Amino acid sequence: MTGTGRQVWIVDDDLGIRTSLTRALRQRGFGVEAFDSAAAFLAGYDGESAGCVVLDYGMPDVNGLELQAELNSRGWPLAVIFITGHGGVRESVQAMKGGAIDFLEKPFRQSELVERIEAALVAAETLRTADANRQRIRSRFSRLTERETEIVEQVLTNPAASSSKELAAALGISPRTVDHHRARIMEKMGVRSMVELVRLASGLGET
């Protein structure tokens, strides 16, 4: 299974809903796959393709919230829109806390769902891009040596005291050694200053 950038998965035990939504979405240029249960979706999804899951809240066996929790635990790159015939404030709050993009009560206009899916795909792509960027930054940090990591931690802990002399005093090494490590750190991290390094790390929540 491959993502198209406009890929939608429908997970609903109601055959009529699956059929009508599949037809309507395909007519609007979406790639669509439909499943009648959470288990069927988990077995059929490849774990990598990006897109939007239109998820029935009230399915038997594994319900929508339980499937959402499973998606989160696996870290799958999917935007989630819940649809339900008996939702309320409590249910929608639970869904949103779990990261759902939207929550629609049946009956709804198909045009409204399409609008929500379009918005969800944009939001999902933004999140996916941000996550990929974080992964690249983490990969750069992983290339640092133990001493280089110590220097970075000192800088992040106290950015105002990040001169070579101050770092040398804190770590018990010479300023010249700090200069050598700083040059290697900036090369590996792709930054031109320790200020840029702090900004880079702040995107990971490291500061």
Image (cartoon, helix red, strand yellow):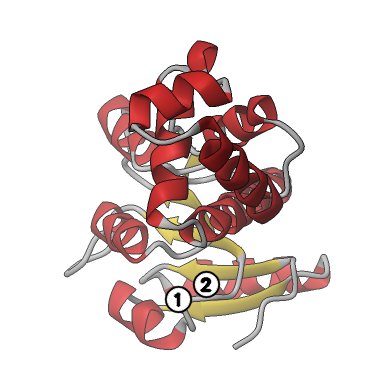
Structural distance between the alpha carbons of marks 1 and 2: 5 Å
Residue 15: mark: 1
For badge 2, the amino acid type reads: Arg
From where the camera sits, is residue 60 visible? yes
Residue 109: mark: none
The residue at 40%/34% (across/down) is 153
The residue at 57%/49% (across/down) is 134
Q: Residue 148 versus residue 126: which sits nearer the camera?
A: 148
From where the camera sits, is residue 110 visible? no
Q: How many marks?
A: 2
In contact (CB < 8 Å): disc 1 and disc 2: yes
Q: In the rendered view, does 165 fall on the left or right side of 7?
A: left
In the displayed structure, would residue 136 be above or below residue 206? below
The residue at 53%/37% (across/down) is 178
Within 10 Å of the Cα at label 2, are there few (<14), some (14-19), or many (20+) other Cα atoms? some
In x, y percent, where is residue 179?
Answer: 61, 38
For badge 1, the amino acid type reads: Leu
Q: Residue 153 versus residue 171: which sits nearer the camera?
A: 171
Q: In the rendered view, does 3 fall on the left or right side of 58?
A: right
Q: In the rendered view, does 30 fall on the left or right side of 102?
A: right
In x, y percent, where is residue 186?
Answer: 67, 45
In x, y percent, where is residue 9?
Answer: 55, 70
Within 10 Å of the Cα at label 1, are there few (<14), some (14-19), or many (20+) other Cα atoms? few
Furthest residue in direction top, as rendered: 160
Q: Which residue is mark 2?
A: 18
* Quadrant occupied by the N terminus: bottom right
Q: Secondary structure at mark 2?
A: helix
The residue at 35%/56% (across/down) is 72
Q: In the rendered view, does 196 fall on the left or right side of 172?
A: right
**Quarter where residue 89 is shown:** top left
In x, y percent, where is residue 116?
Answer: 66, 44
Q: Residue 74 versus residue 20: which sits nearer the camera?
A: 74
